[in-house]
Amino acid sequence: MASGKEIKARIKSVTNTKKITRAMELISTVKMKKAQEWVLSSRPFAIAALRIFANVSESLADIPSIGGHAHTTGREFLVVISSNKGLCGGYNVNTFKKVAQYRKDHPDMTIDYITIGKKAREFILRTGGNLVADFSDVMKDTIEIGDVKPVSSMLRELFIKHGHEKLNYDAIKIVHSYYISAINQKAVTKQFLPLNRTDIVEFLSDIVGQDTSNLTGSEKYNIEPDTETIVNEVIPMILSMLLYEILLESKASEHSSRMVAMKNAKDSATKKVSALTLSYNKARQASITKEVSEIVSGVESMKE
């Protein structure tokens, strides 16, 4: 058994860790609540936009951003979103597992990457992925729509090659964490371009839990003022808002995961302090008993 002095030093060390994790839990709780408000306020717009695209997909089938293209390139683009810092439980790990599984499921596909978050950049470089660009600076606690526009513009330019004639990639997909609640987040792979009706319906029904029975997509709509305006003005704006909402989802998930991880660490530290205190008391009692025994033995030897 360790000495009482050693156990006392360990108790002090674990108590300090408990204080740190408690402080980090409180900070993450405050940030999580703010991020939760932002994501819940932006989510209705994103869902409504996706539903509209699902309904008018037939009328906009000639637009590459909506209908894609008949030929295939054998190339896809993954945008991987993570945190810039660690200590957030399984938040990053679950996202990276999703990326690894996607690679495994598409062995013949050439995949390029953009990362948003330092941990994602480290993961892609460590696993030998072709990293085209990194936008880790975007993953701030307060994300503005202006921070997102350069990323969405770059994705759209990467997707379309030579105007509307050819495509660079079959699809651009985003791997991120979808915020469900403070204790529940889910790593998902969402198609960003083209805005395919099937993928939109699947996402809305399986992940969001929306009723998609009325999303037929078979009706023809009159597009006003014209298709060119939709391509040049409306779609870039919608794509920026969709990406903005995805980043808010990821940020809320990050703070929630960190809050839970720090709470678990604090609770573990509390249990460890209790166990060490018990060990310290036992060691102290054993030491006192030994000293008393030595005194008694000394007295008895003097009597003899």
Image: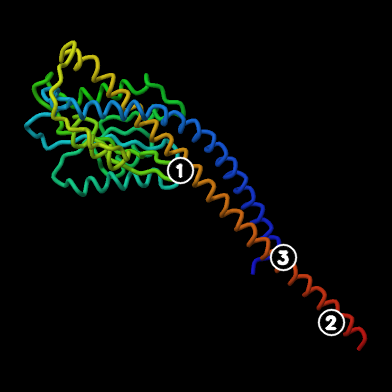
Along the horizontal axis of the image, is 181 left or right of 228? right
Along the horizontal axis of the image, is 179 left or right of 51? right
Disc 1 residue type (three-letter): Ser
Q: Which residue is mark 3?
A: 281
Q: Which residue is mark 1?
A: 257
Closer to the camera, 261 or 66?
66
Q: Please identify, in this view, whether the residue under mark 3 or under mark 1 is nearer the observer.
A: 1
Disc 2 residue type (three-letter): Ser
Answer whether labels 1 and 2 touch (C-beta < 8 Å): no
Closer to the camera, 136 or 274?
274
Residue at image x 69%, y 58%?
A: 8
Q: Quadrant of residue 159?
A: top left
Kindly identify which numbered label has been placed on residue 212.
none
**How far across and down, in percent of the image, does residue 295 sit?**
85, 76
**Local crowd size for mark 2, using a 10 Å CA cut-off: few (<14), some (14–19), many (≥20):** few
**How far across and down, in percent of the image, does residue 120 sit?**
34, 38
**Local crowd size for mark 1, using a 10 Å CA cut-off: few (<14), some (14–19), many (≥20):** many
Q: How far is disc 3 from disc 1 in space, using C-alphas?
A: 36 Å
Q: Quadrant of residue 24?
A: top right
Kindly identify which numbered label has been placed on residue 297.
2
Along the horizontal axis of the image, is 191 left or right of 32? left
Q: Please identify, in this view, whether the residue under mark 1 or under mark 2 is nearer the observer.
A: 1
Q: Residue furthest top?
A: 225
Name which of mark 3 and mark 2 comes first in the sequence: 3
Q: How far is disc 3 from disc 2 in space, using C-alphas?
A: 24 Å
Q: How far is disc 1 from disc 2 in space, using C-alphas?
A: 59 Å
Q: Please identify, in this view, whether the residue under mark 3 or under mark 2 is nearer the observer.
A: 3
Q: Quadrant of the C terminus?
A: bottom right
